[in-house]
Image (cartoon, rainbow, N blue to C red):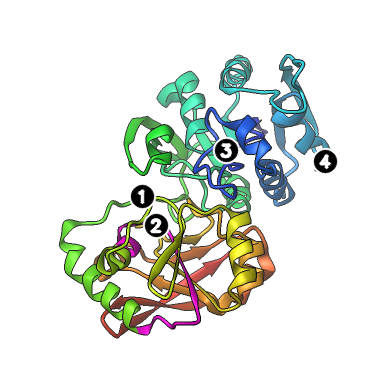
Amino acid sequence: MISIGFLVNPYAGMGGPVGLKGTDNCVVEALHRGAIPQSPLKAKRFLSGLNKSDFLFYTAGGNMGENELKSADIPFITIYQHKKTEQTHKVITSALDTKKACIEILKRNVDIIIFCGGDGTARDIFSCTGPYMPLLGIPAGVKIYSSVFAITPDIASKVLNEWDGFRVSEGEIIDVDEERYRNGYLDTHTYGIAKIPSSPKNIQSCKMVSSGDDSQMMHEIASFIIEIMQEDTLYLLGAGSTTKAITDKLGLSKTLLGIDAIFQKNLIASDLNEEKILELSDRYPKTKIIISPIGAQGFVLGRGNQQISKKVIQKTGIESLIIVATEYKLKNTKTLYIDTGDPVINHSFGKNISVIVGYRMAVRKKLNNY
């Protein structure tokens, strides 16, 4: 029997759709903006895919794992209860609760700790386990740079179903400074090397930073995109240096890590959240979304751009998506992924997708939809 520590960060990922680029230290603000918890649904997706009965789960009370295990009708033992406060309708748990629960779980000599959250959650748990306890992340955060996460919640189920309890490899724990991230600066730091179940095709890679040699290809991509821009169409530009090259060529300012809107080659809105994007798509029936996949990881949707949600894709249509990337980035990114949280929408994109890689140049890239 494999014994599992199971922890859910109930607020992970909430900041993405409302434009906060993360939820660390701003849960109240995310809730005030109307954010809806994402991680409980992803934890349930993971649990629903388990096909073994020889698992023994240890978890924390309420929305830190207990609720999801109850919902999935999976037996478990609760070993930590967080203290409720007068603001239980807003904030119940914190990083300290995650660490306290993790310490209690370690006392049970579990075989692995599985957590649902983002890089901040991974960092909190690793601060307790160190490099000795196998970890597996169910991706639920806004930003996921660490290589201890399964590609999707469903793939996390597959990894655990196939794991023999012994074979392990290594994955990096990486986190960004969210305050600087919200202000447009990407500052990453590696906090350690964790053990993970050995399943290389199912664990995501660390994010790849673009090479300076990409500048000419970015310039060519920008030239082509500007050439095909239509006067009656709204263009939403996602995060990254490739999309920023487009606004640079237009002489416009862009938020490097946010979603901006261009109409008739003028910047009309910056750093948009899901609500603002939907409002703009009401005003501009013709909308195109220009985004670049995360290097090495390959995610087009579902990582770092949750503002472009399934509601947005349902409204604009899958044909609204324009993917841009340099050949160097694609060379190091074998497969592209789309995870909107809705399998029907994911599969509607098909098995291959076009990526603009230069001036009037495009390639077809394999696409995995979960």
- Decide if residue 8 is on the left or right side of residue 139: right
Contact between labelled residues 1 and 2, with CB atoms less than 8 Å apart: yes
The magenta stretch spans residue 242: yes
* Of pointers 2 and 3, the one earlier in the residue sequence: 3
**In what element is the residue under mark 1?**
loop
Q: How crowded is the residue under tag 3: few (<14 C-alpha within 10 Å), some, or many (20+)?
A: many
- Whole-angstrom CA distance, mark 2 to mark 4, is 33 Å
> Which residue corresponds to mark 1?
207
**In what element is the residue under mark 2?**
loop
Tell me the kind of residue under disc 2: Ile
- Decide if residue 38 is on the left or right side of residue 122: right
- Whole-angstrom CA distance, mark 3 to mark 4, is 19 Å
Viewer-proximal residue, 289 or 211? Answer: 289
Q: How crowded is the residue under tag 4: few (<14 C-alpha within 10 Å), some, or many (20+)?
A: few
What stretch of residues is rendered in magenta? 228-244
> Which residue corresponds to mark 3?
117
Q: In this view, does 348 lie above or below 102?
A: below
Image quadrant holding the N terminus, namely top right
> Which residue corresponds to mark 2?
294
> Which residue corresponds to mark 4?
71
* Of pointers 3 and 1, the one earlier in the residue sequence: 3
